[in-house]
Amino acid sequence: MPSRTHFIMKAPAHLSRRQFLRRSGAVAGAALAAPLFIPVSALGRGALIAPSERVAMGFIGVGGQGSGHLLGGAWTYLAGGYTARKDVQVLAVCDTWRPRREQAKLRVNQHYTETYGAGKYQPCEAYVDFRDVLARPDIDAVLIATPAHWHATMAVMAVEAGKDVYCEKPSAVTVRESQAMLDAVRRYGRVYQAGTQQRSEYEGRFRIACELVRNGRIGKLKSIYAYREGGAIAWPTHFGPAQPIPPDLDWDLYLGPAPALPYDGNTGAHRFDIGELNWGQHHYDIVQWGAGTDATGPAELWIEEGKTAYRYPNGVEVYGRPHPDEKVGMDGGVSFVGTEGRITVDRGNLVSTPADIVREPIKPDDLHLYHADSHSGNFLECVRTRKKTICDADIAQHSATALLLGGVVKQLQRPLKWNPERMEFIGDDEANRLLSLSQRPPWRV
Amino acid sequence: MKFSFSMKHSFGLVLAFGLAVLAGPVFLRAADASEEAQLIQTLQTSSNPQVVGAALDRLQRIGTARSVPAVARWLTGESQLAQSARQVLETMPAPEAGRALIDALWKAKGLAKVGIITSLGVRREAKAIPALWDLLRDTDAEVARAAATALGKIGGAVALPALLDSLPAAKEPVRGAVVDGLLACAKRFVEEGNGAAARPVFEMLAGSKEKDFVRTAAFRGLILAAGADGTGLALAAIQGNDGPAQVAALQLARELPGDDTTMKLAALLPNVPVPVQASLIGALDQRGDPAAAGAILPFAGSTEPAVRFAAVTALGNLAGAEAAGALLEAATSREAVIQKAGREALLVLRRGDVTQALLAQLASAKPAIQAEAVRALGGRADAAAVPRLLELAGSGDDASQRACLRALAVLADARQVGALTRLVLAAKSEGARAEAADALASISQRSAGQLDVAPIVEGARGSGSAEGRAALLQVCSGLVEPRIRTAIRAAVKDANPVMREGGVRALCDSRDPEVLPDLLALARDAAEVNFRALAVRGYVRLATDEQTAHATGKSPLALLQQILAVADRPEEKRVVLAGLGTVVDPAALDIVSPLLDQPVVQAEAALAATQIAKAVSGANRDLAETTLKRVLAVTTDAGQKAAVEAALKQIEALADYVTAWQVAGPYRENGKDYAALFDIAFAPETAPASANWRLMPVGTDPARPWLLDLLKLYGGEQCVAYLRTGVYSETEQPAVLELGSDDGVKVWLNGQQVYANNIARPLTPGSDKARVTLRPGWNSILLKLTQNNLGWECCARFVRPDGSRLTGLRADASRGGL
């Protein structure tokens, strides 16, 4: 019986994965039940990832969110995580906390050992410095689930290292960062997907809601309740006395672009947040999808009832608070209000007033939005085919900007006018100066 | 101490900035004319890093050219302040800021220098190019890398030669930054409409031995820079052997301009390798040009799953009726991914007469194809298909009829009740009759009680076949309506056995509480054993329906006691026990517990007792534990034992929550949200005796007896409330107060604040833990709970430091407070 070589086997260190596959003529994955497979030899050049090959991934940040992606968890929308996927091989995990990365590595390798047998796969390695992950030529894509202040910087560096990127939200913490991220993705032609999985997951509720709105089922769209207001970050100018840095932590790498603060015990993902930076992009992503403004942004911003509010060029107003008459919506939700009704959606609910609006299905001749029902599946499909993902860098840049503009108006507490084409506030230097934050060297975007 | 004016002024500023700093993120105040001058003075006179930092932070927003010299002196100093100083100058529109950064370049070293270079890049400071050119050769690799990145950001005809000049000698890690700078320069040329300036750069890199991903980027740039020639480059690359170029071309294929580009791309499909086919079809799909559909259609039958998947998905978006057959074939695929793609594509297929194409398949195709056509017609909500479906359902062969009826179950509405009633009565096979009846039942369900049942009732009482009339009765069983009740009762007494059975089955499926006595009588008196069993089942279902209690005023327990009295056989008792298991009432245990001693129903009695005990355990913990232990003693089934043990553990886990509390509130303040209210002291903190304390209602949610539900009590948003109680401990002992709160919570124990979490979130019991020491005797507790919006809840209990149960405590709501 001729021997068959699977990619899961370890490649010689001096060869890239593609080179290894080309030389070995590997026919990978068939026995591993990847859903679709084509012999890699049919391609012969190794540039595209053939369906028979696994997408090799590195996971940067394996705390709560990252380990959920990696291994599955109570919150995750992917049972068993990426590790359990037969079309993925996890080659690297990275975290500034030693126990996290070592535990993640252990769990991944345990799974592979149980599934494929000891010594029959290329083991996952643990790294403290993400630059070492990016330097590996055999990794196709990285998943970034680090503290928010790192997201865009790492995404840019990953793209500049030739990696495709899945990046948790917020996609950036300043508008300038969001532009730099988009610019890098376009410069290198990489695949990018934002961690705004509401476009794909939750039984398609958000897509259906947006399709109903875009097809005029609530008449002319007048206003949108985003449930959460804008957000931003601010570097602290005040800090307490230093504590000893735990030996298991690389505090300097945790801080990254943030100022060189003394260690104070807080290694949270959102320690520099103002407002709704954590959840906000989920909400504004759906606001923009439903309003049909994925490629633009608000024109006017102000504070109303203590929360941020926007007016888009088409007159639609967006309020950063819940709809007063809705009992649902806080779970990532949005309420669209039109001249003939209202649609409210969150992760568990899709409701309307009148109730019949959501009962009437979208028909073939109606406008259909990008349809994917697995966020990770969409990302991996696009890594292979080079298609545009459901939340690509353009969409992420605009939804992050919608969120971050709210952060500016929240800080200034006065009305502002925004030019979405030029990406600048109109006649307001003070506001424009809040579109970026300096980064601690050597970090930059 | 005597202060000079300036010293006092400085002190005032220090104080002001100190306060601003302590207030957390600074929400901006409007600048006044003298503020900048004051800030400049602070920068010149203060050595306090926090005060300087706050001044720089403010200048980032209001600083002008006047403040540049004062800010610049901090650029090369302590790293955090240097970063703040860069922040001021990086974003300042005044050209003086750029000049100051250039000047500082030569004084700075190491990372401070890297930071300044980065800031020059952010500003796109063209005057810095000569300096940056020199720095490309700096021995500090970080400096050289930063210079390359900055030059890339500045771009233009002057920056580009600097980068090109350094490339031949550049080694990693600097080389990567130089290449990136070149790509950035060239990309900017393209964006500015100067593709001619960009092409040589991209051509040089695309043809180089740089890494594959660099060559992909360069080839991508080359296609974009080439204007009208770009499409030709992309077409050649897709057919070629250069992997990086091919990847770039495939990714851009979705957006290449040109009227005939779609067809040129589509024409490549037959002659490229399989993975390229899949990618190219994906690109054609995302171009959204229906012109590609014809070229893609043959690939819907590809033996390569990746290609077939891409083709089927694309056809749904691009093709029309001509693709219906191929997509139906895909929808019957054994490959789950293909089947799903086919089904989804059929739902969006929209060019030409797709309805007619799908209907045509109903009359002639294989059963699997028929089934998928039915699914598609239903999913497409294609009401235009209804007349033809009704026509086919009354003619054609049996399989075709049934397929049409399945589609009608989805598409027909109240207007088709008469026609479908006639189809039930006229059906020639049992299968067709059942499908027609199902279609009627579906309309009934969707009409939410608004259906005119006259045609169905008249049909059931008419002269049609007994089988048809019986099937119509079955359709009626889901509706509560006097005419239906009369018809069902008449049928139960019908001499025709088919009609009688139809009537009995309809009665036993009925949702009408008025027929409970009929069911009780049937269960007691029917000669047929199976009818008795059906009656018991129907009675139990109705008795445990929430609507029944509303309609009859009788509790489920009372109703179930009646049926238990007539349920003679073990199988009937088991059904009643299943119903009893759903009753949340400790009295139900009085009925179930004796049956634990009857071996033939012991297993079902054990299950019911376990369910009831779990449900009532919050308010009846002792009874629940006693019952569960008894179940454990008699049951022999391992699974049942495990379930009981789990229930006992759960009771213990949720035990000891403190539920005796007084509550005061709600408290609000104009313009303050929940987060701000968290630190505003209201009466319970400042004058507890004056607060409006009252007993906190508990047990408002039977499933969560430990829950304190403030939303139910007060409602509202953006407010706070307080809870207080006393807890008695025999001895001094360490403990952990386990809290769950929606939203934020602050805790005082014996007058000392021991915990605070200003947050908006849903409740998770035990999410927050505060280590405390309980003193002997009474310990007073005060909780402050904030409310953002929606839920407003809390729960609290004490456990030992190791997480185990802490027994022996007791609570008294009158002994709480600060």
Image (spheres, grey):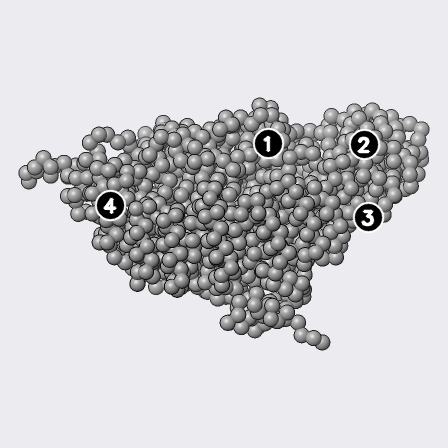
Residue B386's label in the rendered image is: 2
Rendered residue at 67%/54% (across/down):
B277
Q: Indicate which disc, 4 or 2, sits on the residue closer to the N terminus.
A: 4
Judging by the rendered image, the residue that carries numbered circle 4 is B100
Q: Is label 3 in a helix, a strand or a loop?
A: helix
Q: Is label 1 in a helix, a strand or a loop?
A: helix
Give the amino acid at mark 2: Val
Q: Is label 2 in a helix, a strand or a loop?
A: helix
Q: Quadrant of residue B318?
A: top right
B122 to the left or right of B488:
left
Q: Can residue B243 be seen here?
A: yes
Residue B368's label in the rendered image is: 3
Judge the density around disc 4: few (<14), some (14-19), many (≥20) Cα neighbours within 10 Å.
some
Instruction: Confirm or deny contact between disc 4 and disc 2 (CB under 8 A).
Output: no
Are both tags, 3 and 1, on one chain? no
Rendered residue at 65%/46% (across/down):
B284
Are both tags, 2 and 1, on one chain? no
Q: CA distance from mark 4 to mark 2?
A: 78 Å
Q: CA distance from mark 3 to mark 4?
A: 77 Å
Rendered residue at 51%/50% (across/down):
B221
B756 to the left or right of A126:
left
Q: CA distance from mark 1 to mark 4?
A: 52 Å
Judging by the rendered image, the residue that carries numbered circle 1 is A213
Give the amino acid at mark 4: Ala
